[in-house]
Image (cartoon, coloured by chain):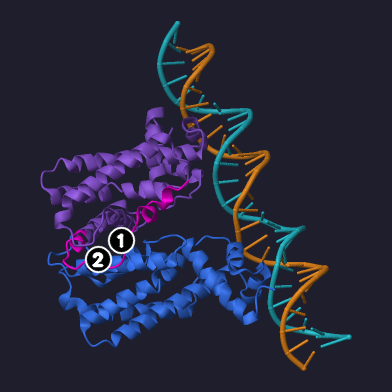
Chain colours: A purple, B blue, C orange, D cyan
Amino acid sequence: MRTQGAARNSEAILAAAREVFLADARAPISAVAERAGVGISALYRRYPGKEDLLRTLCHDGLRRFIAEAEQAAREADDWAAFEQFLRGVVEADVHSLTVHLAGTFTPTAEMNTDAMRAGVLGDALFERALPRMRPGAVAADVTVLLEMCAAVRVPGDADRTTDLRRRYVTLLLDGLRADAPLPGPPPTEAEVNWRWRQ
Amino acid sequence: MRTQGAARNSEAILAAAREVFLADARAPISAVAERAGVGISALYRRYPGKEDLLRTLCHDGLRRFIAEAEQAAREADDWAAFEQFLRGVVEADVHSLTVHLAGTFTPTAEMNTDAMRAGVLGDALFERALPRMRPGAVAADVTVLLEMCAAVRVPGDADRTTDLRRRYVTLLLDGLRADAPLPGPPPTEAEVNWRWRQ
DNA sequence: CTTGAAACGGAACGAAGTATTCCGTTCCCT
DNA sequence: AGGGAACGGAATACTTCGTTCCGTTTCAAG
């Protein structure tokens, strides 16, 4: 046989779903089953439908985002806290998870609560780092920067993707500390959160 | 009536195709017709099939990329030339055009030639700017940076998208001039050009 | 060993979505 | 007025998935 137990399959399915849907949010559910090495029914035994799987995945990402933010907030140095936060979020590829998948399902009330909390935590980290930030930078910029990081990918090589993203987070952090002001009106809340409009 | 002539329709179709396919490379061809305010047959009169439209669009983008590079190369100051190149390519949203659409069609021989020429021109601009670049930066980094810029988008508002991208090009350019070396192995040619593998 | 229930695998089904074709109609120019 | 170029958009012919179903395998308790 191929799998050793129901619990093991559950984990395999979640991992496969993460890989597959991060590579393409519109991937067919059969691709997830195939990747996990299970049949389709193993999937439907656990989730009522595709949307539920997507929702679970996204919510997990959101929770992870919150965890990273809380962890980073414990750092005493303000800029170090912000840097740890950015690097943590990028490392966990949380932004792809939350942003890429948004819009593929209808969010639960709890997700909205969590999303709000995530925003508050992120803003707080940003505010602490603000004194050392270049003039004109706003919290919404960070969201965009995270999105830009998520756009970096080496298909089929998660490790290499992470390596490259680390490289560019470094570059972005340096860019955030430059002296010159940032040009143009900063992104608004709406421009940054359009993916969450149901 | 709605349109004023065949020539006008040709332009409308190309413009609509750019908008629609940049928003979603997998959009149906009917969306293009709708956006252009024409029927489907107006499209098929001009292009044998979907792939040909995509190919035309992408090739136009490639040519524009080359034009921007040649234009920027005329600038005397090395860094200014590089900066003008980056800004020009981002402004024209050429990278989305070439990178987003790659893989949706089989490229012609001429496209491959042009793609190669584009690479050479870009590398030359990078080499000129190299002395003022942070340690560890390579030409392939620029490709990734352009890709990151293309990830910035405000759906349905092209002007605002351009504004925001200008904002982050500024940030990226400053990041490219920081003092500290960039961490990790730089991206390889293959990692940067995976979209062109047929 | 039994044996009943939980887990599965994967074919089959049905609803969508979509590239392309076709034909009747409108436009434009002479 | 007339003929061909351009069109609009319904109809066609597939393809692509989400979901269901049912026969089979696994597992643990007796």
Mark 1: few, some, or many residues within 10 Å (few <14, many ≥20)?
some
Residue displayed at 51% across by 36% down: A49
The image quadrant that residue A54 belongs to is top left
The image quadrant that residue B178 belongs to is bottom left
Residue displayed at 56% across by 77% down: B11
Magenta stretch: give its range.
A173-198
Q: Which residue is tagged 1?
A: A186
Which image quadrant: the N terminus of chain B?
Answer: bottom right
Secondary structure found at label 1? loop
Mark 2: few, some, or many residues within 10 Å (few <14, many ≥20)?
many
Image height of B146 relative to B77, above or below = above
Q: Would you say the residues marked 1 and 2 are in contact, meaning their CB atoms lie under 8 Å apart?
A: yes
Residue B166 position within the rendered picture, expressed as x and y whole percent measured from the top left: 32, 69
- The answer to if A35 sits in the magenta stretch is no
A87, A140: nearer the viewer: A140
Horizontal side of B45 relative to C25 (left or right) equals left
Residue type (three-letter) at the residue carrying disc 1: Pro
Check the residue under mark 1 and report the chain it is in.
A
Residue A197 position within the rendered picture, expressed as x and y whole percent measured from the top left: 45, 48
Measure the C-alpha gap from mark 1 to mark 2. 8 Å
Horizontal side of B125 relative to D29 (left or right) equals left
Residue A78 position within the rendered picture, expressed as x and y whole percent measured from the top left: 13, 49
Secondary structure found at label 2? loop
Mark yes or no: residue B190 visible: no
- The answer to if A187 sits in the magenta stretch is yes
Residue A164 position within the rendered picture, expressed as x and y whole percent measured from the top left: 26, 58
Q: Which mark is residue A182?
A: 2
Check the residue under mark 2 and report the chain it is in.
A
Q: Which mark is residue B10?
A: none
Residue type (three-letter) at the residue carrying disc 2: Leu
- Are tags 1 and 2 found on a single chain? yes
